[in-house]
Image (cartoon, helix red, strand yellow):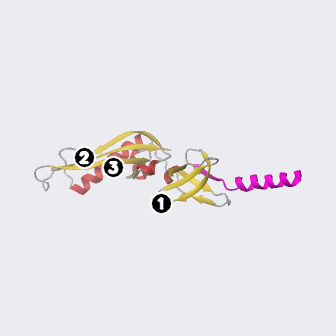
Amino acid sequence: MKKLLFIAMALFVGISSAQVSKIFKHNGDVVNASIKKVEEFTIVFVYDGEAAEYTIGRYAVEKIVHASGREEHISDKIVVVDPKKDWEKVVILEDKSFVAGLNKVGNVRGKTGMINFQTGNTGDKKAEKKLKMEAVKLGCPFILMTSDRTTVGANSNALGGSQAIKKGVVYKY
C-alpha cells in the first residue's frame, strides 16, 4: 500500500511539474510559468506555484520553451550602440503594456528648429530621427511615445511655419 501511494505521489508531482513552461527574457532572466496567452504584443502568464496573472511585453522575451518541449521564438534582441548608424533600429511604442518587462531609463525629446525649411512631413521625420538618436545615446532600443505634436505658425504653407516636437520615455532590457 505504501508503494502504491508513493508511486501515485511521484506521478502527481511529475504531471504537475510538466505543466511549467520557461520564459527566456533578453536580459538573461528565466521565468518558470504557465503560459495563458501569447498575444500580438504581450504574453499573459502565471508564475509557477501562484495564481495571479501577469503580463510581459513580447519585446522583453526572446523565447518560450513550452511544457511540451516545443520552443517558440518571440522576438529578436535589438542592440543599439552608434547613434549615427543604429537609430533606425529603435522601436517606437504607443501602448504602455508593450514595455512590460523592460527597464525605464529616462526621457528623450526630438524637435525641429523654430525656423526650418521642412514641410510638415519631413519636419516630423527629422524630429523622429533626433528622438531615436537620443535613445541610442542612452543605450535604449525602445521609446514609449508620450507626446507628438506640431506647432504651426500664422501661415502653415510658409517655410519655417511649423515645428515638430516629439517626447518619449526610453527603455532597455
Amino acid type of the residue that numbered disc 1 sits on in the rendered structure: Glu
Amino acid type of the residue that numbered disc 3 sits on in the rendered structure: Lys
Q: State the CA–CA distance, disc 1 to disc 3.
A: 26 Å
Q: Which of marks 3 and 2 is nearer the N terminus?
A: 2
For mark 3, give the secondary structure.
helix
For mark 1, give the secondary structure.
loop
Please provide percent x and percent y for residue 134.
Answer: 37, 42
* Residue 107 figure quarter: top left
Kindly check if marks 2 and 1 are in contact, taking CB atoms under 8 A apart as contact.
no
Q: Main secondary structure of the magenta part?
A: helix
Amino acid type of the residue that numbered disc 2 sits on in the rendered structure: Thr
Q: Nearer the viewer, residue 60 or 82?
A: 60
Taking 2 as reference, is 90 left or right?
left
User: Residue at point 24% right, 52% down?
Assistant: 123
Q: Name the residue under label 3.
A: 129
Image height of 142 relative to 157, above or below: above
Q: How crowded is mark 1: few (under 14 residues within 10 Å), some or many (20 or more)?
A: few
Does the segment drawn in magenta span residue 66?
Answer: no
Counting labels gives 3
Q: Which of marks 2 and 1 is nearer the N terminus?
A: 1
Taking 113 as reference, is 50 left or right?
right
Does the segment drawn in magenta span residue 7?
Answer: yes
User: Residue at point 60% right, 55% down?
Assistant: 64
Q: Residues within 10 Å of mark 2 (few under 14, many from 20)?
A: many
Taking 30 as reference, is 143 left or right?
left
Q: Mark 1 points at which residue?
A: 40
Magenta span of residues:
1-24
Q: Name the residue under label 2.
A: 112
